Image (spheres, rainbow, N blue to C red):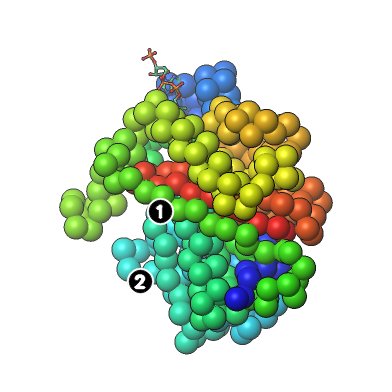
């Protein structure tokens, strides 16, 4: 059986940073409210001519460089996004064309904020099945394009960005005990109306805007994340103190605090980027991962627990040794 080992990661954030104070000039909100309710201070917003594929490509190039791998060595690209450049083709194919690796499979995964966790699970299964050796997994979003900038209950929460990792197949044991230990995915489509976009090619013919019942999403996020984190630990016969780093989806600091508290994890072991990135949906976990790897917090051999919850509802976790 093959194992998926992380060999590199990368990220890209659009240059334009928008603070709470700047938002408060055009929306009926305040820095105090946003910080107290979410922990968000800033978010990055893509330039008018920047698309999700541009962000994804930049993160991919960064990840390949950190892996010391040429794009030509890849044999699969999986890209998680809920904000593709176009309805079709998959944004992954646009990234593939720019990387100059025609021929290998490339496709998108759509699980909104859980997208990167889903994409990692898909990539891991390709590797375990022996169908891929070197896989580029990307989470990339331009949520600024689907926000109703007059709805203060949603527009202050999200940002744009991209993160990526490179996975390499290693025969079990060849990379010590490094690699993905297990993946855990869930969905419950009965909760559609609590978090969705009110448009789409088959309904309105427009891109639509994000709609959310924040309190309801919060309530389910706290419960589902606690449950999937427990599931990941139980599957590996581990206690929470075996985790070196919690790398959570960055939607709201209060949700993250709740998960950390359930795990009895001190805040020093939680990677937090929500203050500077806001919620970047499928990009948030790889962006956080990249930050903690780049600044030397996450080291080879560390046990990391990644988790996310999003529209659908979808939720999941990946336990891995970096
Ligand atoms: O990544 C996908 C998953 N998404 C999430 O995990 C998001 C989950 N939900 C949340 O993070 C929180 O529910 C929010 C941050 C969205 C909202 O926080 P809350 O503590 O649940 O606030 P609320 O929705 O109950 O609103 C409280 C008050 C309301 O006023 P009234 O009705 O009490 O007078 C809102 O109208 O805050 C008001 N409000 C705002 N005030 C200033 C809502 N948005 C804003 C705003 N600025 N931006």
Percent of width and height locating residue 56: 54, 63
> Which numbered dot is residue 304?
none
Quadrant of residue 257 in the image? top right
Q: Nearer the viewer, residue 16 or 235?
A: 235
**Residue placed at 49% from the left, 39% from the top?**
227
Percent of width and height locating residue 18: 56, 37
| Residue 48 visible in the picture | no
**Ligand 1 located in image quadrant:** top left
Q: Nearer the viewer, mark 1 or mark 2?
A: 1
Percent of width and height locating residue 152: 40, 27
Judge: label 2 CB < 8 Å from ligand 1: no
Marks 1/2: CA–CA distance:
17 Å
**Residue placed at 67% from the left, 30% from the top?**
264
Q: Nearer the viewer, residue 149 or 100?
A: 100
| Residue 127 visible in the picture | yes
Numbered label tally: 2
Q: Which residue is mark 1?
A: 111
- Say what secondary structure mark 2 lies in: loop
Against 94, residue 278 (above or below) is above
Percent of width and height locating residue 138: 54, 62
- Say what secondary structure mark 1 lies in: loop
Quarter of the image with the C terminus is bottom right
**Residue placed at 62% from the left, 53% from the top?**
236
Against 108, residue 101 (above or below) is below
Against 214, residue 210 (above or below) is below
Q: Few, some or many C-alpha atoms within 10 Å of disc 1 (few <14, some 14-19, many ≥20)?
A: many
**Residue placed at 60% from the left, 76% from the top?**
1
> Which numbered dot is residue 89?
2
């Amino acid at each position: 059986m093959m194992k998926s080992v992380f060999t590199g990661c990368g990220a890209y954030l659009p240059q334009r940073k928008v603070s709470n104070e700047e938002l408060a000039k055009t929306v009926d909100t305040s820095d105090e409210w946003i910080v107290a309710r979410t922990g968000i201070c800033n978010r990055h917003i893509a330039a008018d001519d920047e698309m999700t594929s541009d962000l994804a490509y930049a993160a991919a190039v960064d990840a390949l460089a950190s892996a010391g791998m040429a794009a030509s060595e890849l044999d699969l690209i999986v890209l998680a996004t809920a904000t593709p450049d176009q309805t079709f083709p998959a944004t992954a194919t646009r990234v593939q064309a720019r990387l100059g690796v025609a021929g290998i499979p490339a496709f998108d995964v759509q699980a909104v904020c859980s997208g990167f966790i889903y994409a990692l699970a898909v990539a891991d299964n390709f590797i375990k099945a022996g169908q891929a050796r070197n896989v580029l997994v990307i989470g990339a979003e331009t949520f600024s394009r689907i926000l109703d900038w007059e709805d203060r209950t949603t527009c202050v929460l999200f940002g744009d960005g991209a993160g990526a990792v490179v996975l390499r197949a290693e025969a079990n044991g060849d990379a010590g005990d490094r690699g993905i230990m297990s993946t855990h995915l869930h969905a419950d489509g009965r909760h559609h109306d609590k978090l969705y976009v009110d448009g789409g090619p088959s309904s309105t013919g427009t891109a639509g805007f994000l709609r959310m019942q924040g309190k309801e999403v919060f309530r389910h996020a706290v419960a589902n994340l606690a449950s999937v984190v427990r599931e990941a630990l139980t599957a590996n016969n581990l206690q929470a103190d075996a985790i070196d780093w919690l790398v959570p989806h960055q939607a709201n600091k209060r949700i993250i605090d709740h998960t950390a508290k359930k795990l009895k994890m001190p805040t020093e072991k939680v990677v937090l980027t929500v203050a500077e990135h806001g919620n970047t949906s499928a990009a948030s976990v790889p962006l956080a991962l990249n930050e903690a790897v780049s600044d030397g917090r996450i080291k080879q051999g560390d046990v990391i627990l990644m988790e996310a919850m999003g529209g659908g509802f979808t939720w999941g976790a990946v336990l891995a040794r970096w």
